[in-house]
């Protein structure tokens, strides 16, 4: 008989993750990484969109904005990763942030309440932010829903994720490097720093494999470390307990 406590056994076992937005920029990369590490992935897809999902995922057809279409098919997943959001966010998409980002997270949480989900991994955005205030506001509202849902969660707060098709801010890296070293701007520059797709996926995988006992927030410094150094239940640079 295994003498370790249930939470320790949960830490050691392979996960089954239910991923919404699995065909997107971040979703495809995350699903591939989870599968490569031996985890099982259940991917929510719209009818006719299965070809955009990484091979090896268990496909679940449904509408990410309607919990009734997938609530009974989350099991046996123990981890929920809701990644649905507006493509290429911009200040002119305020209405879409509400109807897609906000609504999809609400639907995912509704569905999770009736499933045996033990941990949620959510990608928010760096806060506060000087621009994209509507986007930050909607994501902050999603974080509030996570805090009140009763399911332990890890919230990641990147600002911009560099990767294929998402590279224009790389020109700003020298300015970020300088700002992070100036006393008057270092805190803001670190909070709003750029992360790579590889760093983001590594941090997401770490969050899936190391579930939090409560609500945990990983900011840009923690994401750049791949989440390592911010173990569940401890304090460290880049990690904060959510109020």
Image (cartoon, helix red, strand yellow):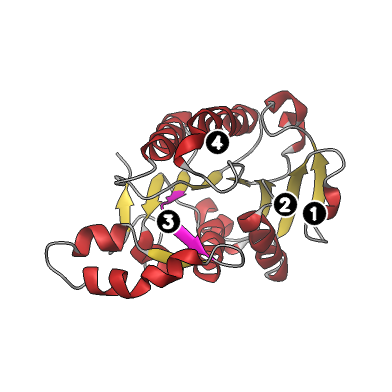
Q: Which residue is under mark 4?
A: 101
Q: Which residue is under mark 1?
A: 52
Real-space CA distance between mark 2 and mark 3, rounded to the nearest whole angstrom: 20 Å
Residue drawn 72% across and 39% down? 74
- The percent coordinates of residue 91 (x first, y second) are 44, 39
Examine the structure image and report whether residue 72 is included in the region drawn in magenta: no
Badge 4 marks a residue whose secondary structure is helix
Do labels 2 and 1 touch, CB within 8 Å? yes
Would you place residue 216 above or below residue 113 in this image?
Answer: below
Q: Is residue 174 left or right of residue 93?
A: left
Q: Is residue 139 left or right of residue 31?
A: left
Residue 92 can be seen, yes or no: yes
Q: Which residue is under mark 2?
A: 23
Q: Which of the two labelled residues, at mark 4 and mark 3, occupies the earlier sequence position?
A: 4
- The percent coordinates of residue 203 (x first, y second) are 49, 64
Residue 230 can be seen, yes or no: no
Q: Which of the two labelled residues, at mark 4 and mark 1, occupies the earlier sequence position?
A: 1
Real-space CA distance between mark 3 and mark 1, rounded to the nearest whole angstrom: 25 Å
Q: Which residue is under mark 3?
A: 158
Q: Which of the two labelled residues, at mark 4 and mark 2, occupies the earlier sequence position?
A: 2
Q: Quadrant of the C terminus?
A: top left
Real-space CA distance between mark 4 and mark 1, rounded to the nearest whole angstrom: 20 Å
Would you place residue 107 above or below residue 52 in this image?
Answer: above
Real-space CA distance between mark 4 and mark 2, rounded to the nearest whole angstrom: 15 Å
Extent of the magenta region: 155-162
Q: Which of the two labelled residues, at mark 2 and mark 3, occupies the earlier sequence position?
A: 2
Query: Where on the picture, by quarter, is residue 63?
Result: top right
Secondary structure mostly taken by the magenta-highlighted segment of the chain: strand
Q: Is residue 78 left or right of residue 130?
A: right
Residue drawn 58% across and 41% down? 86
Q: Is residue 9 left or right of residue 152?
A: right
């Amino acid at each position: 008989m295994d003498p370790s406590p249930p939470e320790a056994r949960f830490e050691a076992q392979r996960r089954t993750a239910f991923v919404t937005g699995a065909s997107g920029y971040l979703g495809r990369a995350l699903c591939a990484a989870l599968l490569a590490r031996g985890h099982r992935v259940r991917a929510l897809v719209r009818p006719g969109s299965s070809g955009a999902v990484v091979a090896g995922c268990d496909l679940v057809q449904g509408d990410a904005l309607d919990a009734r279409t997938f609530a009974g098919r989350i099991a046996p997943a123990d981890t929920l990763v809701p990644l649905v959001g507006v493509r290429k966010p911009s200040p002119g998409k305020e209405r879409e942030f509400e109807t897609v980002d906000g609504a999809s997270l609400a639907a995912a949480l509704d569905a999770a309440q009736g499933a045996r989900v033990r941990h949620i991994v959510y990608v928010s955005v760096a806060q506060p932010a000087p621009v994209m205030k509507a986007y930050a506001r909607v994501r902050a509202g999603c974080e509030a829903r996570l805090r009140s849902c009763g399911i332990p969660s890890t919230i990641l707060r990147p600002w911009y994720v560099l990767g294929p098709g998402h590279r224009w801010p790389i020109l700003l890296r020298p300015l970020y490097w300088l700002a992070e070293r100036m006393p008057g701007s270092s805190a803001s520059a670190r909070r709003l720093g750029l992360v790579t797709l590889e760093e983001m996926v590594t941090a997401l995988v770490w969050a899936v494999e190391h579930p939090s006992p409560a609500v945990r927030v990983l900011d840009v410094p923690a994401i750049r470390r791949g989440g390592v150094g911010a173990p569940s239940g401890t304090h460290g640079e880049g990690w904060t307990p959510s109020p």
